[in-house]
Amino acid sequence: MFRRLCAAVHNRLQVTATLGHRRTAAPSCPHFLGFVKPYSASSVGADDPSSLTASSLIRSCGISDRAALCISKKVQLDTLDRALSVLTLLKDYGFEEAHLVRLVDRLPRVLVMDAEKTLKPKLEHFRRIGLVGTALPEILSASPDLLRRSLEKRLLPNAELLKSILITNANLVNAIKNSLWLMGLDIRTKVLPKVDALRAHGVPDDVICVLLTRYGDALVTDTNRFNEAFDKIKKMGICPKKTTFARALGMLAILPQKKWEERLETLMGLGWSQDNVLEAFSKQPHIVWISTEKTRNTVKFLEEKLGWTPERTVKNPVVLLMSLEKRLMPRHAVLSILMHKGLIKTGFIGDHFLISNEKFMKQFVTKYQEKAPEIVEVIKGVKSCR
């Protein structure tokens, strides 16, 4: 009967699915909070189980009507006291309403955990390793499965093993933020063999630290896929002692083979040789994540407007990552005006696009705005660039 009543209430309330969160941050407006009409606990019948539960949550936890109703759908009346203890504890550790709703939706069983014996020791563990402030609720609400893991058998050993590689808590926190899978997996079997293999091939610990901190997903991927990526990078001649090696391996290990082939085909179709592509990748591995359309538009712009050949672009492949509309085109327009007026030398060099926005404004806009006032309007599209 209780389930049928809850279902009836749920069907009467229309929920808008507006979930749009980052990988590790709690959404500002989760889909559970997006009711079409404002909700008040008093708007549901007083005898309705969901209403009674929501009212208890509002009184005991001090959360809003909407959040209380959403969470009440996951609470059985006979476990309400335990749920209240859990929610109160989570609030003490910095969980806000959006975090609570998201966590409960993804892991309803958290509401029946023993707050003091099971949940609090895990929260304390995460706090000790450096997950403080908003980091703790954001990560755990994004990856609640971590709360299901055994503290003694998984969480504590994983933290120790990762810390032996990463050295500092700050690095450990960054690794967890960038790869939510790390703490929940068996580090001893999933990660350490790959780390040992890298060391055996001359990759120093500081480069491995960069790989684990920023590209941890590469170390938990399938072993065969990891080895294939490693072999490709060795053939490219990327020095294993440089951080570029970590970035390249981090990219290729998680990039589907089909996408790698598409990137090769796209650039080679624009007149690049395979050597050009590999050289550009070795300098700036992130170019493999650029969409085909952006790649084509940027390369055409560099060739048609700047007169850059593939060999010239390869010297500064980072320009392929820059915004065409907000950085490259406005700066090109400003420089073209200044060149036409004879105020600066002709020709576009990489530094024109690589320098910070502040420096560009000072060096080319502020300095010449009296002699060429039109550049002030032209540059407006670049003000948001970094």
Image (cartoon, grey):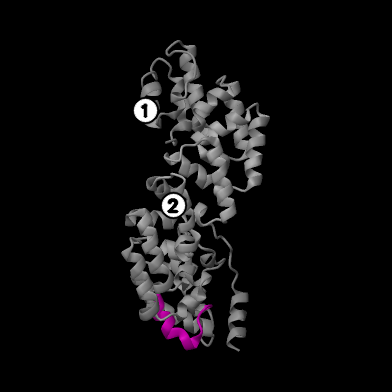
The residue positioned 37% from the left and 60% from the top of the image is: 134
Which residue is farthest front?
A: 200
Judge by depth and name the residue closer to the eye, 289 or 332. 289
User: What's the residue at 37%, 22% (across, down)?
Assistant: 363
Q: Which mark, residue 359?
A: 1
Label 2, secondary structure: give it: helix
Judged left or right of residue 111, residue 306 is: right
Magenta segment boundaries in residue numbering? 73-87
- Residue 36 on the magenta segment: no
Regarding residue 20, the answer to whether it shows in the image is yes
Quadrant that contains the C terminus: top left
Q: Main secondary structure of the magenta part?
A: helix
From what the image shows, is residue 151 above or below residue 384? Answer: below
Q: Are there few (<14), some (14-19), or many (20+) residues within 10 Å of tag 1?
A: few
Within 10 Å of disc 2 (Cα), the crowding (few <14, some 14-19, many 20+) is many
Q: Which mark is residue 212?
A: 2
For numbered disc 1, what is the local secondary structure?
helix
The amino acid sitting under disc 1 is: Lys
Residue 75: give x, y in percent of width and height. 50, 81
Q: Was residue 80 drawn as part of the magenta stretch in this picture? A: yes
Taking 155 as reference, is 177 above or below it? above
Viewer-side residue, 225 vs 262: 225
Q: Is residue 252 left or right of residue 166?
A: right
Q: Is residue 124 placed above or below 216 in the rendered structure?
A: below
Q: Quadrant of residue 298?
A: top right
Q: Nearer the viewer, residue 342 or 133?
A: 133
Disc 2 residue type (three-letter): Leu
Name the image quarter holding the N terminus.
Answer: bottom right
